Image: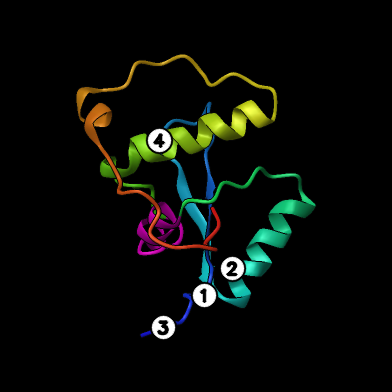
Amino acid sequence: MNERPKPPIAVALHYNVNGGGAPRVVAKGGGQIAEKIIDTAREHNVPLQEDAALAGALSKLDIGREIPKELYVAVAHVLAFAWSVAGKSPPPSSPRPEEQTARLPAPGYSPSRW
């Protein structure tokens, strides 16, 4: 039996390094909305990372909501990727023990983009 491909999901986060708090979901959507989020990110040279599992988890959050502690490590990897692409270094900090143990499963499908 053939499975139909799932439509892409995109989630945009905003993180203020100096403002404190966790990253927040600022946009999310599937299908054409996902494509618009991706196109807008590209137009503004925002690094994109593809991670279907993380995009799926983040898409369940309300817009404006900070990410939960369970996703800190996964999102930290995305932020580190974005900083490296931009040629920057992440701000110095030491993760709390609960942040070090948070995990997500491997991406479940494609072409979801993050």
Q: Distance between the residues labelled 2 and 4?
A: 26 Å
Q: State whether residue 3 is above or below residue 81.
A: below
Pinpoint residue 70: horizontal percent, then vertical percent: 26, 43
Q: Distance between the residues labelled 1 and 4?
A: 31 Å
Give the label on residue 2, or none: 3
Q: In which quarter of the image is the N terminus?
A: bottom left
Q: Which of 12 and 81 is in front in this view?
A: 81
Total marks in image? 4
> Which residue type carries mark 4?
Gly
Contact, mark 3 vs mark 2 (Cβ under 8 Å): no
Q: How far apart are marks 1 and 2 (CA)?
A: 9 Å
Looking at the image, residue 11 sits to the left or right of residue 43; the answer is left
User: Where does the magenta region start and end?
Assistant: 52-64
> Which residue type carries mark 3?
Asn
Kindly identify the residue that appears in the image at 31 percent across and 21 percent down.
Answer: 95
Q: Mark 1 points at which residue?
A: 7
Give the label on residue 21, or none: 4
> Which comes before the other along the chain, label 2 or label 4?
4
Q: What element carries label 1?
A: loop
Q: What element carries label 2?
A: helix
Kindly identify the residue that appears in the image at 39 percent across and 63 percent down.
Answer: 62
